[in-house]
Image: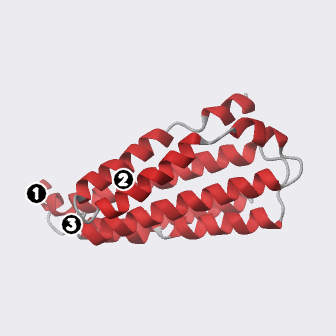
Amino acid sequence: MEAFSDGVIAIIITIMVLELRAPHETTLTGLRPLLPVFGSYIMRFIFIGIYWSNHHHLLHVTEHIDGRALWANLHLLFWLSLVPFVTAWMGENHFSEWPVALYGCVLLLSAIAYTILVWTLLAAPGNALLASALGSDFKGKISMVIYAIGIPLSFVRPWLALALYILVALMWLIPDRRIERKIS
């Protein structure tokens, strides 16, 4: 499951970089119109990187994977595969309301899918190490709440919604320390 997920995530990142188009101008001012597109690329790269890192750590302390976990993992990968589309739409439209809202929806649904994956792994027999590492998962729960607040806020203040999404990314930049402690 880990190798398959790593492959899918690598393809997602490859698709993202292929969407960046070089300007036809040879001056630095030719890059200016691409700044929103590049900004959205940075956001999606970090977002996918955070999921890859935490997914990797999650599977490191998982001792047993069953069929439900495989499907839950595919569910997560589905939502992650939509990240290039929604972030490209957001960058191309200068972070306007609907693209920012849809980006928030994909973030929320990815977080829900990750939570479902964690639940299925915890329900599988033999994953006591994972259960002891995760605890109550406050960070995961508060992330979903922040995403849920950001989605309607996108229609009032898209930049404020983006700030909330970035806040969640900052919370998750460092891989889950609970799992790190169990690994080392």
Residue assigned mark 1: 29
Mark pair 1, 2: CA separation: 20 Å
Left/right placement of residue 102 relative to residue 135 reads left
Q: Earlier in the sequence, mark 1 or mark 3?
A: 3
| Mark 1 vs 2: CB contact within 8 A | no
Amino acid at pointer 2:
Ile
Q: Secondary structure at mark 2?
A: helix
Left/right placement of residue 105 relative to residue 132 reads left
Pair 2/3: label in front: 2
* In-front residue for pair 184/178: 178
Tell me which residue sits at (50%, 42%) in the image. Answer: 172
| Mark 2 vs 3: CB contact within 8 A | no
Amino acid at pointer 3:
Pro
Q: Is residue 20 visible?
A: no
Question: Disc number at residue 42?
Answer: 2
Residue assigned mark 3: 23
